[in-house]
Image: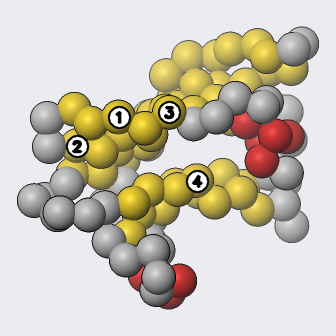
Amino acid sequence: MIGYAFGGVTPVPSLSGNFFILSYAVRTNDPNLLVIPQVTTNVLDSASWTSNGIATSALFPTNINGTNYQQRSSSVPTNGALKQYMRIKVEYP
């Protein structure tokens, strides 16, 4: 499912100032595909993952192996957290 959602391209993490950023391409031709950026400070607590406070921007369209994708960037302020983790949750109902 991850390869289908991202076209086989791994999301890229980065830091910019006080923001943790994840850049990724998302398939645009499947309305059933849900791609949800989430953040936590405790990966051991599965209930702590949340989308609150994450800003996501659609950057530009791209084509990967003949399929249309949209390049996106999701960012969250670090707020001085010593540890912060971000993931992209993929669901296909």
Seen at 78% across and 31% down, the residue is 8
Q: Earlier in the sequence, mark 3 or mark 4?
A: 3
Amino acid type, label 2: Phe
Seen at 49% across and 22% down, the residue is 59
Q: What is the CA distance from the residue labelled 3 to the residue labelled 1?
A: 7 Å
Picture quadrant where residue 25 is located: top right
Q: Residues within 10 Å of mark 3 (few under 14, many from 20)?
A: few
Residue that numbered label 1 is attached to = 14
Looking at the rendered image, the disc whose residue lies closer to the viewer, 3 or 2, is: 3
For the residues labelled 3 and 1, say whether their Cβ atoms are less than 8 Å apart.
yes
For the residues labelled 2 and 4, say whether their Cβ atoms are less than 8 Å apart.
no
> Is disc 1 placed on a helix, strand or loop?
strand
Mark sitting on residue 12: 3
Looking at the rendered image, the disc whose residue lies closer to the viewer, 4 or 1, is: 1
Seen at 63% across and 60% down, the residue is 89
> Is disc 2 placed on a helix, strand or loop?
strand
Q: Position of residue 67 (x, y in %)?
A: 86, 20
Looking at the rendered image, the disc whose residue lies closer to the viewer, 2 or 1, is: 1
Q: Position of residue 44 (x, y in %)?
A: 47, 82
Residue that numbered label 4 is attached to = 88
Taking 80 as reference, is 50 left or right? right
Work out whether residue 27 can be spotted: no
Q: Earlier in the sequence, mark 3 or mark 2?
A: 3
